[in-house]
Amino acid sequence: MASPPPSKVRKIDENPIESGGGNTAAPSDTDIPVPVPSIWSLDSIASGSDALPGSLMCPVCFDTITSAYMTKCGHTFCHTCLRQSLQNKSECPQCKTSVNSEEIFPNCSIEELLSNQRRCRNDNLSKLPSTSTKPSERISELLSGNFDSWLTDDITALLNILAQKKEQRESETETTNRLVFKEFLVHLIRRKEEELASIQQQLSVVTEDLTAVESSLATNSISPHPTSDPQVVPFSAPSPFPPPEGGFNGSRYSSNNPQPSFSSRRHKLFQHFDDIEECYFSLRRSNRVLSDNPSSEVNMFSESLDKFTRFSNIRTLATLVYNTDPYTPSSIVSSIEFDRDNEFFGIAGVTKVIKVYDYYNVIRDAVDIHYPVVEMQCSSKISCICWNSYHKGTLVSSDYEGTVTLWDAFRGSKVRVFQEHEKRCWSVDFNLADPQLLASGSDDAKVKLWSTRDAHAVTTLDADANVCCVKFNPGSRYHLAFGSADHCVHYYDLRNVREPVSVFKGHRKAVSYTKFMNNSEIVSASTDSQLKLWSLDAGRCIRTFQGHNNEKHFVGLACTRDYIACGSENNSLFVYYKGITKQLLTSRLDTVRSLLDRERKDEDGLEFISSVCWRSGSNVVVAANSQGTIKVMEMV
């Protein structure tokens, strides 16, 4: 029995390529009009014929069968190839019929044909111009650079084969390209049809709402293009104090806020048209934008549009200076908070002093020289303060030593001190539903719950990373959210502190602030220069706000109704409306320098907003920067 050759050359598959409804087949070897053997006819002569019959080709190695063996299903292979295939899997390599090594038999008919082939090959080898025994060796010899041994017929045959293979390959490439192009066009048509259906649906909704608006305008006899400014209800109630004539540094206070004109609101509408359009369709998918009753009040989107286009600027009402000592190097304001009645606001920071100011006295003073009602001296730098929602004069603070201190703000004295945190305490907050309950978060990766009546912590929540902020849900006694250095916002039910109710993931860096927009929405700030609005009901982020710069510092975060205020590391205040991703307004804080500092080199590049706070129920916001400058501002 002849042993198989040491290596077998696998032939190129020349089956036709299907394209559409027809076939493009490469010419067979016998159709090649050459006077002498070509690349493939060299192999054919070596096998005894012009073309290798399919019955003499092994389906495994795609070469001439050596030592022919057949399976019980009638397929013939090389004995070695068949054995190796059955060792891997007990099935026929061609038809996959179950076959084992005991169910194969010699194929005498094929073996006889192979014997004739070998005899013819031996006779033809003597006629070849080379002593090579294989076509591959002959081709290698021809291409090795020994061009003197080449015959004209050899070159002609080789060129014909290359030309035909080139034509076949070009045809295959063209067919493949057209198939890919076809797939692209089919997918493009499908996508555009879906977009067209979506646009038609949106157009139907817009047309329906436009008809309702025009009907409402006609019913109320309102001109669609007013020539004079429409009367708009003021955003905040007028102050009982009369406005002064003027103030130092341009401060003003007026109870009659100028109302935006139709043209200014229209300009703001088109300036942020894409964002407003997105807000409109996101609300319209779940709610009707207008009521079926034309005489009813505008709904959610109309209110959103009104709130977004109402304000066009931020003006300064008053300016304060946190640190009046010119020799103190740092004046960063860490926290600003209004009391429960919005009559007083406290300011605290790294100078270890809590200052409480009377809001009305500050804004009505003609000169921006303001004195606090009371000052409370602390033993360490202060990170956060919070007023009690029930006891008017009760204030709590946290500091860099991990101490939580309860104060009587009217007397300026300490009521109780909690010292169980092991590291710096970043945040503290009172529970609105239970005024005796407060929470604090620290770098020791713990959130501690305290009672104003107990000296020790009531409960401790263990976090996986440093806790940067903590906040109670304003509508619940038992729910609390905190942000930490693990880039997440954790929401807990205090009745089960073993695991959180939700963990909101999406920030790329540490979460520095969490604030509740309302009972079901949380706003978080991070040093990835993003604010995110989370829905407690949906358990996901519903909007991301970008525009401010925050990569290193705590820049402050505050929410009131539908507006969000935060600081930026370019020393500017940013105001967002919760329905729009881009900033609504910005205002830069110019640092107030003393006479000794005016000759100092400009340090604007190092200044940043460090704290912000809304005056609840109004459009007044207080912001402070890292140089101790505090501005009371108003959206107009």
Image: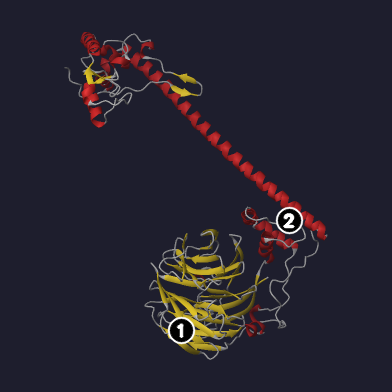
| Whole-percent x, y for residue 242 in the image | 72, 83
Q: In terms of secondary structure, where does tag 2 sit? A: loop
Dot label at residue 292: 2
- Confirm whether residue 578 shows in the render: yes
Q: Depth check: 419 or 612 in front? A: 419
From the viewer's perspective, tell me whether residue 6 is left or right of residue 357.
left
- Location of the N terminus by quadrant is top left
| Whole-percent x, y for residue 524 in the image | 51, 66
Residue at image position (57%, 87%) is: 372
- Confirm whether residue 66 shows in the render: no
| Whole-percent x, y for residue 277 in the image | 64, 54
Q: Amino acid at mark 1?
A: Thr
Q: Depth check: 514 or 169 in front? A: 514
Residue at image position (78%, 57%) is: 216
Disc 1 or 2, which lies upstream in sequence?
2
Q: Which residue is mark 1?
A: 405
- Location of the C terminus by quadrant is bottom right
Q: Amino acid at mark 2?
A: Asp
